[in-house]
Amino acid sequence: MFADDSKMYADITDIADITRLQAALDRMVQWAEAWQLKLSIDKCCVLHIDNSRQFSHQYCIRYTPTLSVIISFLLSHTVVI
């Protein structure tokens, strides 16, 4: 059984929301480990849909940065590794 089909959503409006989302990711890792579920960290990514990049953050899973895909308000895109 694998846990890498999980999804999380957060509306980031301030720095505290970033901290809460990272804490939720950390709890998901702890939950997966407790249930002996494998996480394929190389398959994990973060999708940012934003119009300002004001609260851009590099989220980590097990201290490994995730791949980030950023889509701006004008629907242009960049990939950050």
Image (spheres, rainbow, N blue to C red):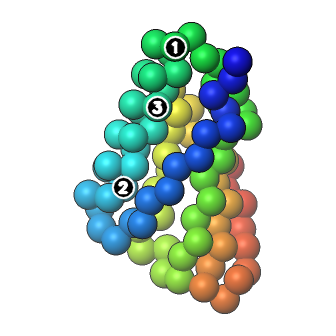
Q: Mark 2: which amino acid?
A: Ile
Q: Mark 1: which amino acid?
A: Trp
Secondary structure under the numbered disc 3 in the rendered image: helix
Tell me: 55 left or right of 41.
Answer: left
Q: Are marks 1 and 3 in contact (CB under 8 Å)?
A: no
Mark 1 or mark 3, earlier in chain: 3
Dot 1 crowding, Cα within 10 Å, few <14, some 14–19, many 20+: few
Distance CA(mark 1)–CA(mark 3): 11 Å
* Residue tagged 2: 18
Give percent across and percent down for residue 55: 41, 67
In this view of the protein, can residue 1 be seen by the observer?
yes
Give percent across and percent down for residue 16: 26, 57
Secondary structure under the numbered disc 1 in the rendered image: loop
Give percent across and percent down for residue 51: 53, 83
Q: Are marks 2 and 1 in contact (CB under 8 Å)?
A: no
Distance CA(mark 2)–CA(mark 1): 26 Å
In the displayed image of the protein, which residue is found farthest to the left? 16
Tell me: 24 left or right of 9.
Answer: left
Residue drawn at x 50%, y 39% is 60
* Residue tagged 3: 28
Residue mark closest to the camera, 1 vs 3 = 1
Q: Nearer the viewer, residue 64 or 27?
A: 27
Residue drawn at x 60%, y 85% is 73
Residue 36 lies, with reference to residue 76, above or below; the image says above
Secondary structure under the numbered disc 2 in the rendered image: helix
Residue drawn at x 52%, y 21% is 32
